[in-house]
Image (cartoon, rainbow, N blue to C red):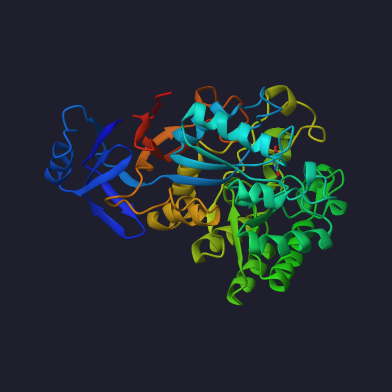
């Protein structure tokens, strides 16, 4: 097993911030304290001589990040991403666990597919991949997936992501099962009849460009409906990638009433507006679409006051030929894993501790991964850690990203905040910003 000394860093977790060295042996944190405490703890286990020393000067040492929303494309669309390449992008972004969305081919609606994803992830060994199960078979919105069977196999988050569950009776039934099964349903909020043929946010910009619009209402109606279904059933609902000011307001009010709802926002929804589409470049096409400056302000306010629990990337790789298609034919989605931390640090006017909370322990809890991830940096805890320099500046160069696809809207942007090391299961899978596998 690997033994590690993480030296000269500042530990930041749910217990606050302090200067400390961290020692790791056999996958577990064995000391958090002075340099002497850390080396003594390893020496006592005959683990000092072969320990790898990771310099954390100028860095934060925090629990590893947990992304509630990534598309790894395997099985079915390996030309865009594989579990291995997506896991590598995740590790480089400081993530030690990701939730893999089920819009694969086949979709995650059966045990063999879930097992396949887990096997591929274990083979890559770069981060934990928790496959989200489908709510309905083939995400078709007609018949429930075998929720009980998948829950028994350890699946804890279920969604038809990419498709909102349109039928309220079916969603109600799924929530009635969810509560006794101890699982969480995550909703992609989109009333499909309101977004047929839509290309971008419905507003002045889309009228100006003459493109079919994607009304904010399509999202907000489903947020409202599912808040009411959470009230009726008492089962938790997680709202995926909120993008509108009114959605944030609805969730804020639901939380104030004590309803069991949580939510996430993607970095592109607090950094980019619909005006980016003036050049008709499909790299800016995403579902839900980029909205207005007022929506961005509301998303940021939601993150600041905790209405939005988590920053989740909606990492959605697409090969160049599909993104080069005309805007109405190009698929929605953009990369996110390798830029999430830096965009959050650069663009959010929030204390670093709150940013790390939204990237780590809050999503870990929503994903039911909090026995292993988002844990305090403390003796006896599993060593799933991110070590990052919050002041380091770097420029996004698509060709240098580990993802198999290149569809980042941030090419050429200089951002602040860079992951230096990522430790997964006690193993340094990223050292000095270089993936080790
Ligand atoms: O932009 C998006 N792309 N939104 C989704 O909901 C799905 C995703 C994808 O799979 O490409």
Q: Is residue 376 above or below residue 251?
A: above
Q: Is residue 298 above or below residue 127?
A: below
Q: Is 321 situated left or right of 405 in this image?
A: right
Answer with the quarter of the image where residue 130 lies: top right
Q: Quadrant of the C terminus?
A: top left
Q: Is 247 situated left or right of 335 in this image?
A: right
Q: Position of residue 428 (x, y in %)?
A: 35, 32
Q: Quadrant of the N terminus?
A: top left
Q: Is 309 situated left or right of 381 in this image?
A: right
Q: Position of residue 35 (x, y in %)?
A: 15, 43
Q: Residue at x 68, y 58 (%)?
A: 244
Along the line of sight, the residue nearer the viewer: 40 or 33: 40
**Residue 237 visible in this rendered orientation of the protein:** no
Q: Position of residue 334 (x, y in %)?
A: 64, 37
Q: Is 178 situated left or right of 118 in this image?
A: right
Q: Residue at x 85, y 45 (%)?
A: 212
Q: Position of residue 32 (x, y in %)?
A: 22, 49
Answer with the quarter of the image where residue 429 lies: top left
Outermost residue toward the bottom in this view? 257
Quarter of the rendered image showing ligand 1: top right
Along the line of sight, the residue nearer the viewer: 411 or 311: 311
Along the line of sight, the residue nearer the viewer: 136 or 221: 136
């Amino acid at each position: 097993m690997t033994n590690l000394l993480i030296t000269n860093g500042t530990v930041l977790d749910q217990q606050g911030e302090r200067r400390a060295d961290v020692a790791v042996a056999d996958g577990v944190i064995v000391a958090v304290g002075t340099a002497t405490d850390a080396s003594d703890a390893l020496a006592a286990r005959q683990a000092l001589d072969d320990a790898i020393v990771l310099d954390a000067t100028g860095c934060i040492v925090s629990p590893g990040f947990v992304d509630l929303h990534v598309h790894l494309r395997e099985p079915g669309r390996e030309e865009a991403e594989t579990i291995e390449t997506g896991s590598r992008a995740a590790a480089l972004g400081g993530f030690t666990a990701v939730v893999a969305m089920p819009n694969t081919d086949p979709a995650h609606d059966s045990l063999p597919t879930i097992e396949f994803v887990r096997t591929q992830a274990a083979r890559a060994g770069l981060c934990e991949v928790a496959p989200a199960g489908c709510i309905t078979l083939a995400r078709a919105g007609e018949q429930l997936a075998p929720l009980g069977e998948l829950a028994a196999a350890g699946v804890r988050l279920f969604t038809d992501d990419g498709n909102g569950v349109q039928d309220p009776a079916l969603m109600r039934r799924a929530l009635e099962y969810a509560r006794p099964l101890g699982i969480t349903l995550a909703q992609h909020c989109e009333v499909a009849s309101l977004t047929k043929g839509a290309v971008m946010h419905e507003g002045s910009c889309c009228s100006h460009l003459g493109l079919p619009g994607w009304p904010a209402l399509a999202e907000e109606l489903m947020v409202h409906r599912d808040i009411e279904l959470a009230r009726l059933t008492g089962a938790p609902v997680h709202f995926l990638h909120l993008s509108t000011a009114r959605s944030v307001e609805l969730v804020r009010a639901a939380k104030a009433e004590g309803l069991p709802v949580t939510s996430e926002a993607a970095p592109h929804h607090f950094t980019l507006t619909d005006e980016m589409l003036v050049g008709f470049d499909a790299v800016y096409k995403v579902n839900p679409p980029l909205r207005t400056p007022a929506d961005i302000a509301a998303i940021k306010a939601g993150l600041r006051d905790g209405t939005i629990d988590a920053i989740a990337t909606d990492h959605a790789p697409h090969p160049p030929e599909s993104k080069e298609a005309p805007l109405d034919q190009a698929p929605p989605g953009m990369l996110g894993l390798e830029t999430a931390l830096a965009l959050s640090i650069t663009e959010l006017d929030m204390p670093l501790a709150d940013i790390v909370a939204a990237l780590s322990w809050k999503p870990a809890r929503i994903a039911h991964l909090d026995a292993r991830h988002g844990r305090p940096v403390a003796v006896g805890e599993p060593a799933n850690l991110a070590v990052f320099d919050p002041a380091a500046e770097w420029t996004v160069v698509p060709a240098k990203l580990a993802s198999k696809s290149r569809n980042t809207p941030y090419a050429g942007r200089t951002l602040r905040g860079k992951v230096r090391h990522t430790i997964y299961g006690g193993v340094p899978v990223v050292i000095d910003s270089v993936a080790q596998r």
